[in-house]
């Protein structure tokens, strides 16, 4: 049974470091956006993509919405996703994550009771773009946007937060790559090489 929650993919970035739209990168014989939409649709009742240019995404089997506040980065995308979410909580992920783990996403989504934010905290720091948020966060996010303070963890203080420790993450993330992003051509090359090595084993 799917969870009554919204899965949100943020795909409104400028892609300046990659040079092409990261959402449309080919991974495992399909585009990254197709792969992650398909994954989230197996988990959630609702799936939404937040974009800057909707025409490129209209063929996808997901709700499409454009940033309410243009040019406000991931924080603006997070606000838009929560604002339009038909459910109280939403799982939010960046579009450039090739190793999203369905079991882990379900685990986070099933541990939201009493919390505004459920966020992984591996050894290298919090992962705010692979986390679950409540619509209770909207006023604080809006305050940051209004002052152009766009640090995505800037609205965390004052909210009820469940941080998932490295120990809690270990069984879901044995290769320690679950939160990897494809930000640059070098990242993409490294990812492709890792996939080639897996196929060769």
Image (cartoon, grey):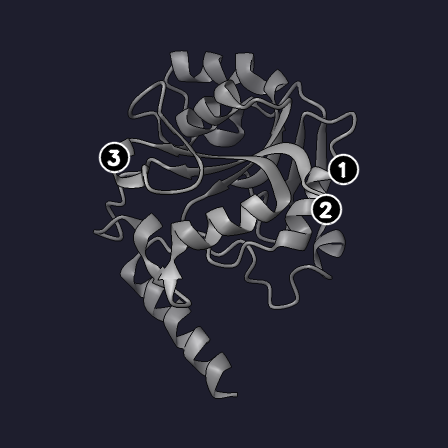
The residue that appears at 41% across and 52% down in the rendered structure is: 34
Asked whether residue 53 appears in the rendered view, the answer is: no
Q: Which mark is drawn over residue 111?
A: 1
Crowd class of label 1 (few under 14; some 14 to 19; many from 20; radius 10 Å): few
> Which badge, 1 or 3, is on the more N-terminal residue?
3
According to the image, label 2 marks what residue? 107
The residue that appears at 34% across and 49% down in the rendered structure is: 23
Crowd class of label 3 (few under 14; some 14 to 19; many from 20; radius 10 Å): few
22 left or right of 169 in image: left
The answer to whether residue 106 is above or below residue 113 is: below
The answer to whether residue 100 is above or below residue 117 is: below
Distance between the alpha carbons at the discs numbered 1 and 2: 7 Å
Distance between the alpha carbons at the discs numbered 3 and 2: 33 Å
CB under 8 Å between callouts 1 and 3?
no
Distance between the alpha carbons at the discs numbered 1 and 3: 35 Å
- Depth-wise, is mark 1 or mark 3 nearer the camera? 3
x, y (%) of residue 90?
59, 31
Q: Quadrant of the N terminus?
A: top right
- Depth-wise, is mark 3 or mark 2 nearer the camera? 3
Asked whether residue 143 appears in the rendered view, the answer is: yes
Residue 49: name its quadrant: top left
x, y (%) of residue 157?
63, 22
x, y (%) of residue 186?
31, 64
CB under 8 Å between callouts 1 and 2?
yes
According to the image, label 3 marks what residue? 55
């Amino acid at each position: 049974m799917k969870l009554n929650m919204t899965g949100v993919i943020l795909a409104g970035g400028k892609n300046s470091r990659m040079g092409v739209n990261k959402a449309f990168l080919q991974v495992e014989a399909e585009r990254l956006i197709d792969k992650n939409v398909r994954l989230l649709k197996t988990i959630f009742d609702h799936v939404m993509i937040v974009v800057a240019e909707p025409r490129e995404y209209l063929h996808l089997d997901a709700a499409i919405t454009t940033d309410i506040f243009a040019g406000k980065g991931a924080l603006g995308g997070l606000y838009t996703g929560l604002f339009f979410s038909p459910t109280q909580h939403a799982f939010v992920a960046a579009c450039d994550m090739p190793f999203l783990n369905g079991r882990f996403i379900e685990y986070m989504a099933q541990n939201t009771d009493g919390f505004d934010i459920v966020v992984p905290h591996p050894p290298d720091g919090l992962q705010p773009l692979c986390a679950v948020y409540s619509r209770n966060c909207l006023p604080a996010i809006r305050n940051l946007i209004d002052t152009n303070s766009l640090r995505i963890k800037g609205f965390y203080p004052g909210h009820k937060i469940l941080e998932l420790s490295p120990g809690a993450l270990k069984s879901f993330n044995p290769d320690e790559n679950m939160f990897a992003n494809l930000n640059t051509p070098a990242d993409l090359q490294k990812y492709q090489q890792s996939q080639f090595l897996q196929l060769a084993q």
